[in-house]
């Protein structure tokens, strides 16, 4: 089981570049994400952030000021703020040469081969051999650009660049226990059933509510559970993906506590309230996923069920305090497993650093669980779900319009 979470000792300086000065990098009240905090804990005084790259330079400077007024000052006191990666590259001194990049910029600005949205390609070209950590999803651009993601994946693989993508739920102790049960009992997964219900009134970013900017909740948010489904079910036959949605303008789609002015968003770009999808895995197994923008408060309600012959593995509340319920042959009652002090955000960063440092005390514990290519496959699945739901919504609207015309004619 993967559970490594120790601080790395040693004296060598570890230069790192942060791309993006937003919430995923430095934390927010909306969730537990905060890569800087985990890296500070993992690397300790060895960590030196040589550059913080973000076009919003004033925000970046304010963030650094707070860090320099804290006990981690030594990691940030010489950090330079740069608007672009090119600016850092052109002014970098030999002493600032990075050992790793952590990319937490918005996904609409990466994941392609197009200038200005190609940070991965820039790093591969100008900083060969330097490791990369990239936040999920790998992109949120037009569906036609997915092929560019696969090209980036090929370049990363061909160059032997160490790269990890931030699908942290794969690193949960509960997730790894599920994997071990399947492997130890030589099981074949028959079905995966995933559900993700957010607490919408705490989602304060207007862009999140706009499909043209965030690509929609399945792609931007539900991606974690689509990825986790693939982690157990394997590759998806994309031609089998089917989906339905509850749209904002349907009677059941009314929400009473939307925290932003949704009327400022063009109607065609407003997000669905519910999306429900099914598909076939290439193995023959069946997958399903339902995303809901329905709950209020702060905590989300998320579950994944994995079925195999005689077994049901049910993962509950992975974002807060993961609980695993296991039913197996010979016992109709579910065994309950709880996991204290498990931080998958830390584990994913820890495994990435261990791989960079080539720490081999326990090779299995230095395994990166989400490659760039695998992440592109999860991204492709989320797009397939969105497109399938939009096709079914359009067909329903067309049928309703025809029925209305026919009814008017009879009248």
Image (cartoon, helix red, strand yellow):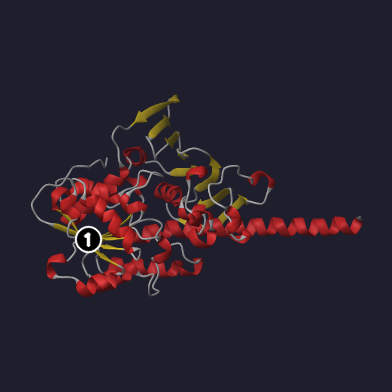
Q: In the rendered picture of this protein, how many numbered marks are placed on residues? A: 1
Task: Look at 26% across and 47% down and name the residue there.
Answer: 37
Quick one: quadrant of the N terminus?
top left
Residue 105 located left or right of residue 194: left
204 or 394: nearer the eye? Answer: 204
Task: Look at 29% across and 54% down and name the residue there.
Answer: 63
Q: Is residue 164 above or below residue 301?
A: below
State the residue lying farthest toward the right.
411
Task: Look at 58% across and 48% down and name the residue there.
Answer: 273
Residue 322 located left or right of residue 142: left
Residue 411 located left or right of residue 104: right
173 or 124: nearer the eye? Answer: 124
Percent x, y of residue 122: 30, 71
Percent x, y of residue 133: 29, 58
**Dot 1: element:** strand
Dot 1: within a 10 Å radius of its alpha carbon, few (fewer than 14), some, or many (20 or more) residues? many
Q: Does residue 281 appear anywhere in the picture?
A: no
Q: Is residue 361 above or below residue 210?
A: above
Q: In this figure, which residue is indicated by the disc labeled 1?
A: 100
Residue 10 located left or right of residue 100: left
Quarter of the image for residue 304 reads top left
Quick one: quadrant of the C terminus?
bottom right
State the residue lying farthest toward the left.
11
153 or 258: nearer the eye? Answer: 258
Percent x, y of residue 269: 58, 60
Percent x, y of residue 136: 38, 55
372 or 198: nearer the eye? Answer: 198
């Amino acid at each position: 089981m993967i559970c490594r979470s120790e601080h790395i000792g040693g004296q060598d300086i570890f230069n790192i570049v942060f791309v993006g000065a937003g919430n995923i990098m430095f934390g927010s009240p909306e969730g537990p994400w905060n890569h800087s905090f985990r890296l500070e804990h993992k690397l300790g005084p060895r960590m030196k952030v040589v550059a913080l790259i973000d076009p919003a330079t004033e925000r970046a400077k304010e963030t650094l000021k707070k860090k320099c007024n804290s006990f981690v000052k030594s990691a940030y006191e010489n950090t330079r703020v740069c608007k672009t990666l090119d600016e850092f590259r052109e002014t970098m001194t030999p002493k600032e040469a990075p050992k790793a990049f952590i990319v937490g910029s918005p996904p609409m600005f990466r994941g392609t081969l197009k200038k200005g949205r190609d940070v991965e390609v820039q790093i591969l070209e100008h900083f060969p051999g330097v490791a990369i950590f990239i936040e999920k999803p790998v992109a949120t651009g037009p569906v036609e650009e997915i092929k560019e993601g696969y090209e980036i994946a090929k370049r990363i693989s061909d160059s032997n660049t160490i790269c990890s993508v931030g699908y942290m739920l794969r690193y949960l102790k509960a997730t790894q226990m599920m994997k071990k049960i399947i492997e130890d009992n030589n099981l074949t997964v028959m079905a995966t059933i995933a559900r993700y219900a957010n607490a919408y009134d705490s989602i304060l970013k207007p862009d999140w509510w706009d499909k043209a900017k965030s690509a929609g909740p399945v792609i931007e948010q539900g991606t974690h559970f689509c990825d986790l489904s693939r982690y157990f079910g394997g590759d998806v036959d994309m031609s089998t993906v089917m989906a339905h949605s509850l749209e904002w303008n349907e009677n059941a789609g009314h929400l009473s506590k939307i925290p932003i002015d949704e009327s400022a968003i063009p109607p065609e770009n407003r997000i669905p309230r519910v999306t429900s999808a099914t598909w076939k895995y290439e193995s023959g197994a069946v997958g399903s996923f339902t995303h809901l923008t329905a709950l209020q408060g702060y905590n989300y309600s998320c579950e994944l069920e994995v079925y195999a012959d005689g077994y049901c593995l049910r993962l509950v509340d992975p974002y807060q305090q993961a609980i695993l319920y296991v039913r197996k042959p010979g016992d109709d009652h579910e065994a309950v497993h709880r996991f204290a002090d498990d931080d998958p955000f830390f584990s994913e960063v820890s495994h990435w650093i261990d791989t960079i440092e080539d720490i081999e005390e326990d090779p299995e514990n230095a395994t990166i669980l989400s490659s760039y290519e695998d992440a592109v496959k999860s991204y492709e699945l989320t797009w397939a779900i969105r497109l399938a739901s939009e096709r079914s919504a359009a067909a329903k609207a067309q049928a309703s319009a025809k029925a209305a015309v026919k009814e008017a004619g009879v009248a």
